[in-house]
Image (spheres, rainbow, N blue to C red):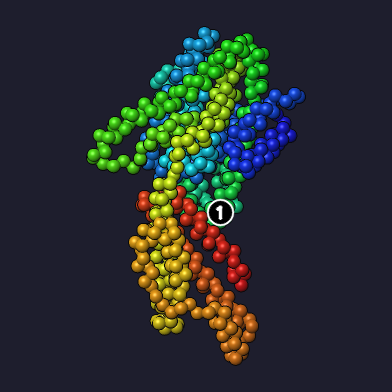
């Protein structure tokens, strides 16, 4: 694959994604459909992408961005159901697919069949998350799907490594597998957290948004490759680094936070578009590889459809079976202590059980299967690849196209969750306003020595009235009960705000009568403006500290915190970019 082909595929995929987003369609599925149609155009050359490119270049930034924008608070609360899906479901799916494939195809050895199971086991939540966000799935469902996709790749790739070794040498044991898995987890997480800590220290010292963003862009690749070099899980390393940096985001500069967000959104769009276009473009050539091999295309197609059926059926069976067991366990514990995670409703379980689309890891793992195994050509390679592509494309089309209809039919929404978020945001906004008011009140003593206590009190009241009125109005609109609980904040009274224009004219007139030069007036005005801007910045930072403290105490959801933080960041950025800083 030459550079022109890569650029052409990227450009076409992004244009298709732009059109799909414009009309409100699911862009990954539209790109996939266009790629499937384009793959059968006469004269189209084969688009070969090295598996190392997919696993080492495409996957790390996608995983890192997902972890960066995920709520560690929600992930930690839902770690048990996430682990059941991200580890348990992957193992069960790999075993079920492997056994079915082994029984159906007598030519396929058991290690090769289990290798196929490891390849098709991990769902990719990119398409599911896109549908969920657009249709307003509750956050706990999105947390479960996103968390599953962050750790199931590590489980699958570890199984893939073990089964591939079994195909090569036939000497891999269960004990060896457990050691490999434990080493992958420990090394991967340690490398990810260690590198993220160093990156955060560097970013905190540099405080340069451009350099900080470059460090953030390099981190997922460095974390992945170093972890893989030392037998760790590159996937878990990237996820751990993303969670660490995302949790520490409030400690970075405002400019860095505002600078990184659109860049990562653009990277996600570019890589996701390329991935789904590549999936579609490969089907024709995978079929050709089976025809060119010693395998029967009819038998390979039957096996592929059977594997697709197993992948579709195992997920809901596993989810409902384990949920029944866990709920009975929770029912016994509920009388003793509450759990931080609210179980999914029946309708939410149904949606979760149907959101099992496969993606980049399945394709990359299938493409990475060696041509030669144990000194001889690996005859089953083409059949395994066809089955992997059938599962990826089949789940994306069957589940991806029907998932929006299912969500709408079940009438699942996040209205209750939004109401809770609004109440939480209203309460925290008022707390943050109190903190900002305290900053102003802290200046009264200093001002009193210059203008007297009454005038200092009047100015402090005037400086906080607008903020108090704005945030109380916002809180009332979001959740009236939360605003009424803090209505005592409105008891602050004072003189009416003076006319800024009139005072400015008085200063100019006084300057003329006192004989002050224009340069002196400019110096005094610049000094006053600078002090006012500094005071406003201190107020915003006090509000931000309050918001972060509420998140750290577990009283504010991280999603709501980021929403408020962005508003405060934009306000501080506007003050830093103001014309007053040129004085």
The image quadrant of residue 34 is top right
210 vs 28, nearest the viewer? 28
- Is residue 195 visible from the viewing direction of this image? no
- Is residue 349 visible from the viewing direction of this image? yes
Secondary element type, mark 1: helix
Rendering coords of residue 251 (x, y %): 47, 54
* Quarter of the figure that contains the C terminus: bottom right
In the image, what residue occupies the spot 59% across and 39% down? 25
Horizontal arrangement in the rendering, residue 136 relative to residue 40 (left or right): left
Whether 10 is drawn above or below 426: the answer is: above
In the image, what residue occupies the spot 43% across and 57% down? 478
Q: Residue furthest bottom?
A: 513
Residue beneath disc 1: 258
Figure label count = 1
Q: Residue furthest top?
A: 106
Q: Residue furthest right?
A: 43
Horizontal arrangement in the rendering, residue 216 relative to residue 144 (left or right): right
For label 1, the crowd category at 10 Å Cα-Cα, with few meaning under 14, some 14 to 19 and many 20 or more, is some
* Quarter of the figure that contains the N terminus: top right
The image quadrant of residue 32 is top right
Rendering coords of residue 57 (x, y %): 59, 35
Whether 190 is drawn above or below 358: the answer is: below
55 vs 338, nearest the viewer? 338
In the image, what residue occupies the spot 50% across and 39% down? 132
295 vs 576, nearest the viewer? 295
Rendering coords of residue 319 (x, y %): 40, 28
In the image, what residue occupies the spot 44% across and 63% down? 473
Rendering coords of residue 464 (x, y %): 44, 71
């Amino acid at each position: 694959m030459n550079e022109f082909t890569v650029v052409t595929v990227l450009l076409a995929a992004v244009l298709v994604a732009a059109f799909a987003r414009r009309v409100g369609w699911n862009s990954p599925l539209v790109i996939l459909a266009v790629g499937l149609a384009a793959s059968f155009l006469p004269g189209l050359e084969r688009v070969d992408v090295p598996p190392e490119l997919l696993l080492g270049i495409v996957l790390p930034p996608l995983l890192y961005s997902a972890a960066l924008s995920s709520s560690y608070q929600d992930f930690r609360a839902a770690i048990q159901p996430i682990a059941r899906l991200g580890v348990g479901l992957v193992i069960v799916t790999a075993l079920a697919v492997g056994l079915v494939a082994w029984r159906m195809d007598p030519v396929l050895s058991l290690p090769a069949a289990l290798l196929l199971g490891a390849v098709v086991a991990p769902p990719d939540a990119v398409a599911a998350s896109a549908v969920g966000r657009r249709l307003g799935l509750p956050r706990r469902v999105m947390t479960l799907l996103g968390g599953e996709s962050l750790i199931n790749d590590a489980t699958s790739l570890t199984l893939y490594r073990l089964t591939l070794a079994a195909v090569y040498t036939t000497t891999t044991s269960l004990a060896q597998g457990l050691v490999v898995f434990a080493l992958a987890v420990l090394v991967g997480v340690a490398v990810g957290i260690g590198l993220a800590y160093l990156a955060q220290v560097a970013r905190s010292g540099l405080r340069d948004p451009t350099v900080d963003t470059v460090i953030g862009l390099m981190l997922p690749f460095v974390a992945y490759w170093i972890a893989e070099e030392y037998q760790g899980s590159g996937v878990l390393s990237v996820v751990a680094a993303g969670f660490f940096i995302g949790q520490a985001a409030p400690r970075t500069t405002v400019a860095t936070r505002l600078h990184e967000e659109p860049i990562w959104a653009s990277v996600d769009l570019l890589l996701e578009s390329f991935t789904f276009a590549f999936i579609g473009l490969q089907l024709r050539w995978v079929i050709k590889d089976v025809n060119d091999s010693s395998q029967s295309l009819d038998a390979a197609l039957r096996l592929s459809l059977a594997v697709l059926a197993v992948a579709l059926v195992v997920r809901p069976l596993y989810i409902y079976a384990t949920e029944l067991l866990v709920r009975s366990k929770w029912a016994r514990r509920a009388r003793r202590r509450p759990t931080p995670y609210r179980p999914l409703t029946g309708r939410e379980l149904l949606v979760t059980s149907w959101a099992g689309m496969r993606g980049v890891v399945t394709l990359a793992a299938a493409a990475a299967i060696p041509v030669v195994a144990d000194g001889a050509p690996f005859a089953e390679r083409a059949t395994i690849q066809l089955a992997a592509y059938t599962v990826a494309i089949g789940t994306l089309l069957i589940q991806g196209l029907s998932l929006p209809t299912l969500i709408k039919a079940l009438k699942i929404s996040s209205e209750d969750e939004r109401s809770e978020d609004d109440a939480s945001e209203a309460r925290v906004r008022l707390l943050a306003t109190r903190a900002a008011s305290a900053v102003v009140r802290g200046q009264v003593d200093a001002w009193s020595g210059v203008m007297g206590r009454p005038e200092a009190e009047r100015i402090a009241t005037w400086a906080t009235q607008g903020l108090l009125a704005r945030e109380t109005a916002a809180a009332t609109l979001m959740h009236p009960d939360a605003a009424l609980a803090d209505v005592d904040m409105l008891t602050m009274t004072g003189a009416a705000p003076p006319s800024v224009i009139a005072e400015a004219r008085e200063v100019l007139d006084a300057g003329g009568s006192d004989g002050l030069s224009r340069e002196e007036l400019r110096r005094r005005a610049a000094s006053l403006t600078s002090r006012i801007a500094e005071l406003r910045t201190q107020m915003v930072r006090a509000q931000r500290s309050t918001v972060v403290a509420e998140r750290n105490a577990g009283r504010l959801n991280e999603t709501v915190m980021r929403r408020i933080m962005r508003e405060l960041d934009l306000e501080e950025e506007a003050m830093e970019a103001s014309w007053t800083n040129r004085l």
